[in-house]
Amino acid sequence: MLRNFLIICLCCSGCQSVYNFTDPDGPAWRETSNAVVNERDPETIRVISYNVQYSKKINEAILELQTYPNLMNADVIMLQEMDTLGVHQIAVALNLSSVYYPAATHGKDHSYFGNAILSKWPIIDSHKIVLPHLSMFGRQRIGVAATVQIGSHKVQLVNVHFETMTMKRRKRVDQLKEIISFVQLTYSDGPLLVAGDFNSFFPKDRKRFSALMAEAGIDWASQDIKYTARALGGLIKPTLDLIFVRELDVKEVGVERKTKASDHLPVFVELGF
C-alpha cells in the first residue's frame, strides 16, 4: 500500500520529456582546482555523499559544506541530481577539482541531471557507467567513477544514483549488478568506495544490495545509519543513501541531520588506509 501511494504521489507531480545521454564517453565536464595538497599520505580521509535535490539550493548546500563540522574540509564529495552550474559553483567555492557527467535532462527547462565527484586531490581518470532500464518516465540513470591520487594511494570511487522504487526491485538490482561488473572489470583491486543514492527505500532493497556487494568483496560501511532522507514533509524517513568500501578502514560514519538544502541528508565517512 505504501509503495502504491508513493508512486501515485510521484506521478501526480508531473513529468516533462527527457533526453538521455547514452554515450558512455560524455558529455563530461572536468575542472582542476589550484589547491595545493600535502604530498604525504594522510592518516584518514573524509568522504561525503549528498543528493542536492535537482540542484535547487546550491548556495545553501555550499554554506552547509563550509560550516558544518561533519562536512567541512572533506577530501572527496560525491553529488547526485546535479547540473553543470551547481557542480561548478560548489567546486569553486570549496576549491576542489571535479568531474561531472549528466545522465539525462529533466523539467521544463531541460536542465541537466547527473552525478559529480569533487576532490581536493588530483582526479586521474573518470568514467560514466550507463545503467540498464529506464524509469517509468523514460529517464536514464548512471554511475560516475573516478580514481583519485591521495598521497601514494590511488583510491577508486563510484558515485551511483539508482532509480526510485517506482521501478521494480529486480530492475534496480540489475543496476547494481552493472556497477559491480564495472568494478570487477576496471577497478578489480585496491581501495574502493561506492556511495550515493541507492533509492533503497525498503529493508529488502538494502538487504539485497548489501548481499550482492558482499559477494563482490565490498563491505557495507553505513549499515548502522537509520535514515538519510525526508519524504512527505518528514513523515517518512527512508534510508536511501548508502556507502560501501573495500580495502579501507571505517573510522567514523554518520549523517548530518541539520541540513536543509535537500530532501536528502549528507552521509559522511572517515576512512583509513
Image (cartoon, grey):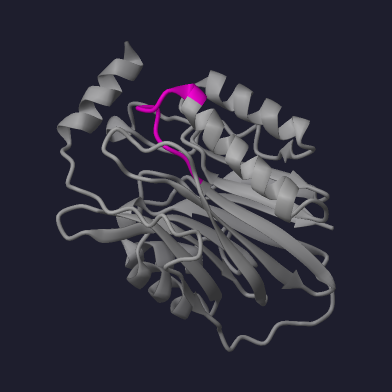
In terms of depth relative to the viewer, which is nearer, 110 or 262?
A: 110
In terms of depth relative to the viewer, which is nearer, 57 or 217?
A: 217
Give the x, y percent position of residue 177. 61, 36
In terms of depth relative to the viewer, which is nearer, 165 or 33?
A: 165
Residue depicted at 81% across the width and 56% down the height: 272
Give the x, y percent position of residue 199. 46, 35
Q: Is residue 124 above or below residue 81?
A: below
**Which quadrant of the figure contains the N terminus?**
top left
The outermost residue toward the front is 23
Residue depicted at 84% across the width and 78% down the height: 40
Residue depicted at 44% across the width and 49% down the height: 258
Q: Is residue 250 above or below residue 74?
A: above
What's drawn in magenta, residue-wise?
Answer: 161-170
Q: Is residue 222 above or below residue 109?
A: above
The secondary structure that most of the magenta stretch takes on is: loop
In terms of depth relative to the viewer, which is nearer, 139 or 2?
A: 139
Give the x, y percent position of residue 39. 80, 82
Give the x, y percent position of residue 53. 34, 51
Answer with left or right where residue 156 lies relative to residue 225: right
Residue 61 is covered by the magenta coloring: no
